[in-house]
Image: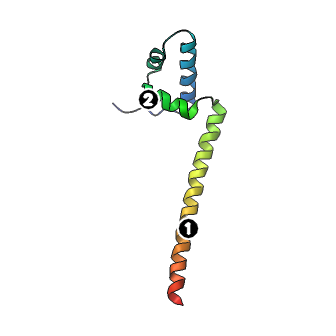
Amino acid sequence: MPRKRHKAEEIVAKLRQVEVLIGQGQSVAEAIRSIGVTEVTYYRWRSEYGGLKGDQVKRLKELEAENTRLRRAVSDLTLEKLILKEAASGNF
């Protein structure tokens, strides 16, 4: 069975749904089962997205993508610098 990739907004909605179900008196395990994920997935989501709102999740994902792009740029520049340094040391 293929794994389903949940979007960040869906994750936040499911976390809120679990909070509502727990508030209505269901046990944590029953509430987690009702949203269709495992307990491990629920606790991982809660640690990553707990307390965030929809717009904050979008901003978090944008920042993560920008951070990845910038890290890649820095690593490329560092590699070029090392190559140029090595080439320059051979010329002298």
Q: Among all residues in the image, which is located at the extreme left?
A: 1
Residue that appears at 55% across and 24% down: 15
The image position of residue 3, as x and y in percent, is 39, 33
Q: Earlier in the sequence, mark 2 or mark 1?
A: 2
The image quarter containing residue 29 is top left
The image position of residue 89, as x and y in percent, is 52, 84
- Does residue 55 lie above or below 24 as drawn? below
- Does residue 83 lie above or below 37 as drawn? below
Label 1: which secondary element: helix
In the image, is 52 to the left or to the right of 86?
A: right
Label 2: which secondary element: helix
Residue that appears at 54% across and 78% down: 84
Tell me the distance, in whole angstroms, between the alpha carbons under discs 2 and 1: 38 Å
Give the residue number, with chain letter if any, for mark 1: 78
Say which mark, if any, is on residue 40.
2
Indicate the amino acid at tag 2. Answer: Val
Q: Quadrant of the C terminus?
A: bottom right
The image position of residue 46, as x and y in percent, is 54, 29
In the image, is 50 to the left or to the right of 30?
A: right
- Does residue 19 lie above or below 40 as drawn? above
The image quarter containing residue 75 is bottom right
Indicate the amino acid at tag 1. Answer: Thr
- Does residue 61 lie above or below 4 as drawn? below
Disc 1 crowd, CA 10 A, few/some/many (<14, 14-19, 20+):
few
